[in-house]
Amino acid sequence: MNEWIRGYLRAQAAAHAAIPIEGVARLIEFLQEALRHDRQVFVFGNGGSAASAAHFATDLGKGASDRLARRFRVMALTDNLSWLTALANDYAYEEVFVRPLQNFARPHDLAIALSVSGNSPNCVRALEWARDHQLRTVALVGGRPCRLAELADLVLAIPDTHYGRVEDAHMTILHLACYAFMEHPEWGA
């Protein structure tokens, strides 16, 4: 068991070492622009990525915003369970993220999709709509070729296919994006 734990931690360290630093810096720049121009930030994903989306919205909307003169307008599209299930029931599960975007999104807002596979139909559908309606698009994905990577203005890919390792690396990217503003509030000016 100890060797398995050591092996897992070595693989996790490799996943974290592969986080694209320039891509994270670009994500922070996208967030700076959204903040400066009072644009909405939308974030979404399924399963563990849904939890990461909600965590990011909390950290950006509360933690980072508490340190800044202006607050981030951020929404995790995973957080309204009654709306999400109504959309899945009345339309299709592929529609659960795109329909709220249709209600709230405006050109130049920011849409961030989290998906280890990068092929989740509901995330793909939302990013297609976002791209077609002039939103900035970001995809945090795993190590396989995927549809989200084809759609996004910015792709942050972790070269691994293990869901836990990739989700942990994605959460580190999202924490970096939030803590950039918490630890350097001047970057939000």
Image (cartoon, rainbow, N blue to C red):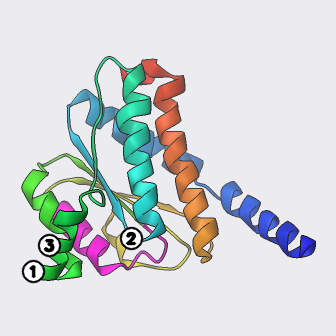
What x and y, as percent, mark residue 172? Answer: 58, 50
Near mark 3 (Cα within 10 A), the count class, few <14, some 14-19 or many ≥20, is few
Q: Is residue 154 visible?
A: yes
Whether 14 is drawn above or below 88: the answer is: above
* Horizontal and vertical percent position of residue 173: 53, 50
Say whether marks 3 and 1 touch (CB < 8 Å). yes
Reply above or below: 58 against 169.
above
Q: Nearer the viewer, mark 3 or mark 2?
A: 3
Pointer 2 residue: 46
Secondary structure under the numbered disc 1 in the rendered image: helix
Viewport quadrant of the C terminus = top left
Residue drawn at x 30%, y 33% as measured from the top left? 72
Give the residue drawn at x 36%, y 71%: 148
Q: Which segment did they paint magenta? A: 115-131
Q: Is residue 1 left or right of residue 66?
A: right
Residue type at mark 3: give it: Ala
x then y, percent, for residue 136: 26, 52
Which residue is at a point 20% across and 32% down the rendered structure image? 38
Label 1: how many Cα within 10 Å (few below 14, some 14–19, many 20+): few
Foreground of the two, 102 or 46: 46
- Location of the N terminus by quadrant is bottom right
User: Element type at marker 3?
Assistant: helix
Please, what is the three-letter code of the amino acid marked with disc 1? Answer: Asp
Report the disc number at residue 86. Answer: 3
The amino acid marked with disc number 2 is Asn
The CA span between labels 3 and 1 is 6 Å
Query: Dominant secondary structure of the magenta stretch?
Result: helix
Q: What residue sits right under mark 1 in the picture?
A: 90
- Residue 129 lies in the magenta-colored region: yes
Q: Earlier in the sequence, mark 1 or mark 2?
A: 2
Asked where in the image residue 159 lies, by quadrant, the reply is bottom right
Is residue 158 visible in this depiction of the protein?
no
